[in-house]
Image: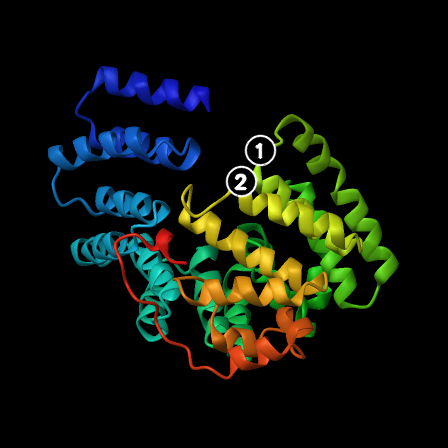
Amino acid sequence: MAQIEAALDRALRLQPDLVEALQAQGRYYSYALGDYGRALRALSRADSLRPNDAATIRSIGRIDLDRGKLSEALRRFRQAVALDPRSASSHLQLGRLLTWMRRYGEADRHLAQAVVLAPDAPFAWRWRAYATRLRGDTAGERRVLREAIARIGIEKLLSSETWADFILTRDTANWVVLEAAGPEAFETDTVRYLQWKAEFAAVRGHAPRARAYADSARLRPEAELAQRPADGILHGDLAFIYLSLGRTEDAVRESERAAAFLPLEVSYGDGMVTLENLAEVYAHAGRSDNAVAVLERLLKMPSTISIARLRADPVWAPLHGHPRFRQLVRQADRPPAESTDQRETP
């Protein structure tokens, strides 16, 4: 990271008004360091030098999103799309946020456009599939993912993110190809590869093999956590590994620590996902009351939890007999109330 920062500083010393370098500096401060103040200073300067640049506005919108200022982020993403309607990134960011806000029809239009504009980009396909899942249409999600597989291949889908792997591994039409996928499909992230192999083995009923993969997956995160005990991502990874090993109390402990280290106030997106993961761990660890309480909170705020998904997604099967969960899924999905700072939603 130090080399990236040095290269950006050098570029700006040579050309202090180079907008592209200021944009890159803003993204670096925001995404790599989480330093939103320095990021906004760089992006504000870029905006003053080249007003109404879609890339600058989109980057500022990402910071608004991380800071929980979702109404501002929505306004900026809409502006970015209007300024550059051929930008797949702008459509993707807008579609993703609309998905969180449960405006699925509008979200799907933008995510579909992102796929049209960038048909080889895995994230566009994955978010369109995910938005379909949130509407409760698991068959539709399979259809979208099969289209994506035909276009870009399973390996690219596996390398992009983890949340669609669940549905992929349950689509038996692709099991032969999935069986052949190696660590390179996960961009040499061996921990994630081993986690995925453990899940894939479990889906097919190979419990001893699943435990062996999960036991191998835990070694590196445990060692890294000794060096970085406040790393919420590592705690979250270990939670699911321990869950695969049947170590439910350890899984709950690690998931609760992840939520403590990644609150909504630090990053709305990471905090939201961490809360969803906490609910899932609670559900599979037999803590049904705790799981439903977290789900109720997520339903009151923009998130990737929807009533339709709770009904259809087998992830939540352990809660199906719980009275509060049954009452919850009888409700209708509705968009959350907008505010300037969704982090304050109880």
Which of the two labelled residues, at mark 2 and mark 1, occupies the earlier sequence position? 1
Q: List x then y, in percent, for residue 92.
A: 35, 58
Q: Residue at x 74, y 44 (%)?
A: 217
Nearest the camera: 163 or 11? 163
One can see residue 43 in this view:
yes
- Mark 1: amino acid: Ala
Q: List x then y, in percent, for residue 275.
A: 53, 55
Residue 219 figure quarter: top right
The answer to whether 233 is drawn above or below residue 172 in the figure is above
Q: List x then y, in percent, for residue 223.
A: 72, 31
Disc 2 designates what residue?
A: 261
Furthest toward the right, the residue is 208
Residue 230's disc number: 1
- Mark 2: amino acid: Phe
Quadrant of the snapshot with the C terminus:
bottom left
Q: Are marks 2 and 1 in contact (CB under 8 Å)?
A: yes
The answer to whether 167 is drawn above or below residue 333 in the figure is above
Q: List x then y, in percent, for residue 36.
A: 32, 34
